Amino acid sequence: MDIHCTNKEHFILKKIARSAQMLGMPCYVIGGFVRDKLLHRKTKDIDIICVGDGVALAHIVAKQFTPTPAVAFFKNFGTAQIKVGFIPTSPSREKGIKNELRSSFEEVEETFDIEFVGARKESYQSHSRKPDVTIGTLEDDQLRRDFTMNALAISLNEADYGQLIDPFNGIADLQRKIIRTPLDPLQTFSDDPLRMMRAIRFATQLKFTIDDNTFEGICKSVERIKIVSQERITDELNKIILTAKPSIGFDLLYKSGLLQHIFPAMVDLVGAEYVEGVGHKDNFYHTLQVLDNVAHHSNNLWLRWAAILHDIAKPATKKFEEGHGWTFHGHEVVGARMVPRIFKQLKLPQYEAMRFVQKMVLLHLRPISLTKKNITDSAIRRLLFDAGNDLESLMILCRADITSKNKTKVTRYLENYNFVENRLVEIEEQDKIRNWQPPITGEMIMQTFNLSPCKKVGDIKDAIREAILDNIIPNTYEAAYKFMLKKGGELNLSPQ
């Protein structure tokens, strides 16, 4: 396998090599950068390991660039970081740039994050994933890596510059698309249990297979995930969700036993129950298919979370009705109520993102209910009003929710959604309801009837909104004002 570096990357590595030589310090590029270059994947993260003081090396490297980047360093950990940016050059500027630098520039702006660390040994205590660190050799540092493909290193030393150092057959594992730990998996995952999540994340991102012995190690070590912070677990979970086919990761999380520890509400969806020979679909694997369908059409993390949670309340609402079969009445309402608690447990954002997911879960059944031929314009208006700017996202979710193996049924559902979308366009063009602001505000109501904030103000405001959505009155200030006076009279209020 060949290393394919860009001009900019070669330029950076040469600067680092020159700096390390000035310090008389053995130096290597290691880990994800090497892996991704071998896999022809783009990366902007470069990890540098040196046999010596990584912070000192970072300061010397920073001085090789103009303008000189700031060095963020952490003495306690012996690590340092710099960001190196490349700004596109114009022909007039290129005349004043050295040949070495000119050849590294391309017509795009790019920034590389470079991390420096001294080679080290690590040892762990059972209650923590924070290691006790001592100075080590390159070999010691490679031994502490999570997977063989991440233990690959390339020499930046003058005597053997560019030589690939592969102590655990990581190249062979990359070629076979295998994820394997360099040490015994039980030790690797006991030392740092987050590596179990990383193994599954890499398998999902790269579409690799986890080595049987390594996967068995995950299955035996799942209890260790309890010592990992929820923030780190959720970060890995989000990376899985943002892959091209996230179902791969969730299936592995479930089969390994990890999902039961990190997201038990999702495990409750697994399986189909049968009564009198009548069963329902396995809502876990249905959810994974919906998630993949959404991922095919949208990179929006929160819409993908909506796919994960759209049926989360089905176990709580499941009921068998004689002569009818299995029902999940109100699962969208119960599910929407569950969203804030799940977001809090998983340490996900509590405000805008959570409210968006909650809205998607609550509304995901509404569009299909509008496919009946006798549906009123009022119902269409209400969906436009309730969905607002998120209507397109909602329709992506609804279409993704069609997972039947019956092609005729799928075609019929898609045609129904086409019908709904056409109606939505027609009503919106006619009434401009999306992101609608009421023509009469609460302040106007209080001023008109000389009221302080109270329930009657809200009642009048709600009545105006409902009258417009039901097409009882036009969506105009004049009509709304007259209706406000009428409603106020019904509440024994007189305009001042």
Image (cartoon, helix red, strand yellow):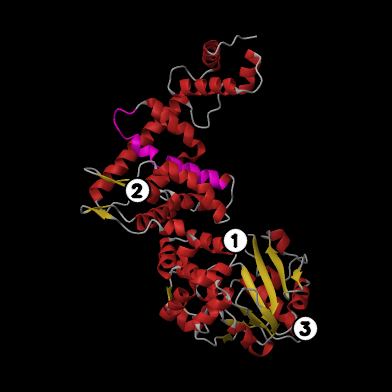
Residue 331 image point, x, y percent: 40, 44
- Nearest to the observer: residue 322 or residue 210: 322
Which residue range is magenta in the image? 353-375
- Residues under labels 2 and 1: Cα distance? 32 Å
Of marks 3 and 1, the one in the foreground: 1
Residue 244 image point, x, y percent: 45, 60
Based on the picture, tell me whether residue 358 belongs to the magenta stretch. Answer: yes
Q: Amino acid at mark 1?
A: Glu
Residue 452 image point, x, y percent: 66, 20
Which of the two labelled residues, at mark 2 and mark 3, occupies the earlier sequence position?
A: 3
Q: Amino acid at mark 2?
A: Lys
| Residue depicted at 58% across the width and 11% down the height | 493
Residue 288 shown left or right of residue 449 in the figure = left
Q: Quadrant of residue 5?
A: bottom right
Secondary structure character of the magenta stretch overall: helix
Residue 91 shown left or right of residue 221 in the figure = right
Which of the two labelled residues, at mark 2 and mark 1, occupies the earlier sequence position?
A: 1
Does residue 413 appear in the picture of this structure? yes
Of marks 2 and 3, the one in the foreground: 2
Residue 42 shown left or right of residue 259 in the figure = right
Circles 2 and 1, Cβ within 8 Å, touching? The answer is no
Q: Is residue 77 above or below residue 298?
A: below
Local SS, label 3? helix
**Residue count near mark 3 (Cα–Cα under 10 Å), binned few <14, some 14–19, many ≥20:** few
Which of the two labelled residues, at mark 3 and mark 1, occupies the earlier sequence position?
A: 3
Residue at image mark 3: 22
Residue at image mark 2: 318
Q: Amino acid at mark 3?
A: Met
**Residue count near mark 1 (Cα–Cα under 10 Å), binned few <14, some 14–19, many ≥20:** few
- Nearest to the observer: residue 58 or residue 337: 337
